[in-house]
Image (cartoon, grey):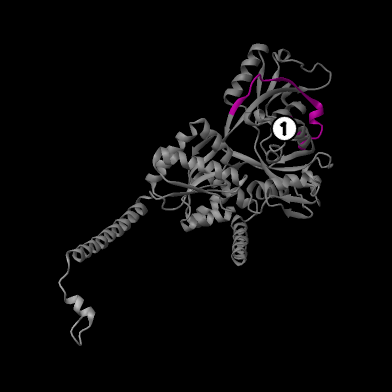
Amino acid sequence: MAPSGMDPQETNAAAPPTPGRQWLSRAGWLVVVALLALFIWGLQRRSRLEATGEQAVQMLFVPSVEQGTLVRRGDELARFIRADSGLVLRSQVPTSYAAVIQALGAGQADVAWIPAFAYVVANARYGAEARLQVVRSVDRYAVVVARSGGGGEPQRLEELAGRRVAFPASVQGQLRAMVVERLDRLAPGWVEVLADDDRDAVRRLVESADGVDAAVSRYVYSAPHDLVGDGRKELEADRPGTLRETRVIATTDRPAPELSTVYYGCVLTRSDSGIDRLEDLRGKSFAFSDETSTSGHIFARALLQRRGVELGHVLFAGGHPNVVQAVFDGKVAGGATFYSPPSAINERDGTLVADARFLIVKNMQTAEERAAYLEQVRVLALTDPIPNDVCCIRRGFPEAVWQRFAASLDRFLATPDGQSAYYDLVAGVAAATCRDGDFDGFRSALQSSGVSAVSLLEEAEERLRRQREKSGGAR
């Protein structure tokens, strides 16, 4: 018992420490020192990672196709790059273009794959930098067209010997070589008459300009009533009767790949709608995809305005497949979506087309279903060309990290699995180096369209803000 008037704790404190207590005291100090060292190391590592950018790279895709596909394929790319380069990559799919642009501005995204429209806004607002552009491949054939009917019109290539052939500048490279070789072999002495493009070549033929006896045109598959795919169909949109007055007398034996960094918007309608020209849409109901969609709204609206088409009731369907279905169901007289020419992939998988109708027909089980759908929904016209999607980085993203990412992406695209995943992610076959100045022409086209991209984005951001507030209140 402690002496009277002394606190027991004081008694214990005054007692000499036992060996066991001395060991515990030292161990406690060692733990404190170790934790402090770990904390300091963590701060230093965080500072080093922030300086080099070697923390997890946040990569975003816009919700252009099914989110499940983007998530799955994005994860495949992330796993490859981590194994290949050591970079930790996190792939995400926000809810809208506006969300991706905001993430770039807030430093919550390092790399983003976005449409050219979204890129020019992200560049103007937050200094995002274009680094790569999606390259798509089209497997094009070429056709030789002559006038139909009697009067000694050529029926075979051999009958073009010594005759004049309108040859478009748009037929280039391997495809041009294939056509020239065949004409030289079968129709010696034929004379080339230079035309601007496929449509111009056919126009020279049907108008008998320059004494032309035949025309060459590029060709891709198009649905039975589409007014795209070759020069004959394109001219038919402006000059009804062209298809009736011409016929194809030869087609190349095989297609030639054509790489492109542009795509198009298109105007769709039902084949039985009685709408054969854009002007027929005056006063009619119409569906655009989304207010911030370049192909499904901005360029399509500019096309209609140039043709003096004032629409009736207009709705925004909330996505390209929704537009296609609204047209098919007869809810609207016309609609605007994206268009890309089909490739060999579409031929192999039986989808046949690569425009927005692809998103519908790819889920159909039989060729008969797909053919019936394409019979009923037609492409009426194309917009001006639009730059393919852009891979951009946020302002301040470390150059060394970008180089590692880009080199690893190249190796990913060199594998069959990588090619397949990349096609599902951005519908591309390659990635071409680009810079901001490459989009100056696109900026001018946006400005001349009379549509304010910035104001449209601000509206989209306001909708996004309201959605977030609503979801926050729901929780």
Q: Residues within 10 Å of mark 1 (few under 14, many from 20)?
A: many
Residue drawn at x 54%, y 53% is 100
Quarter of the image where the C terminus is located: bottom right
Q: Residue furthest bottom?
A: 5
Asked whether residue 451 is in view, the answer is: yes
Corner quadrant of residue 10:
bottom left
Query: x%, y% of residue 454?
Result: 59, 57
Query: x%, y% of residue 240?
Result: 81, 35
363 relative to 410 in the view: left or right: right
- 454 relative to 54, above or below: below
Residue carrying label 1? 222
Image label count: 1
- 374 relative to 331, above or below: above
Amino acid marked by disc 1? Ser
Corner quadrant of residue 472:
bottom right
Residue drawn at x 46%, y 41% is 79
Residue drawn at x 32%, y 58% is 43
Residue drawn at x 63%, y 14% is 184
459 relative to 57 in the view: left or right: right
Circle 1: element type: loop
What is the span of residues highlighted in magenta in the rendered image? Answer: 228-257
Quarter of the image where the N terminus is located: bottom left
- 159 relative to 20, above or below: above
- 166 relative to 89, above or below: above
State yes or no: residue 303 in magenta.
no
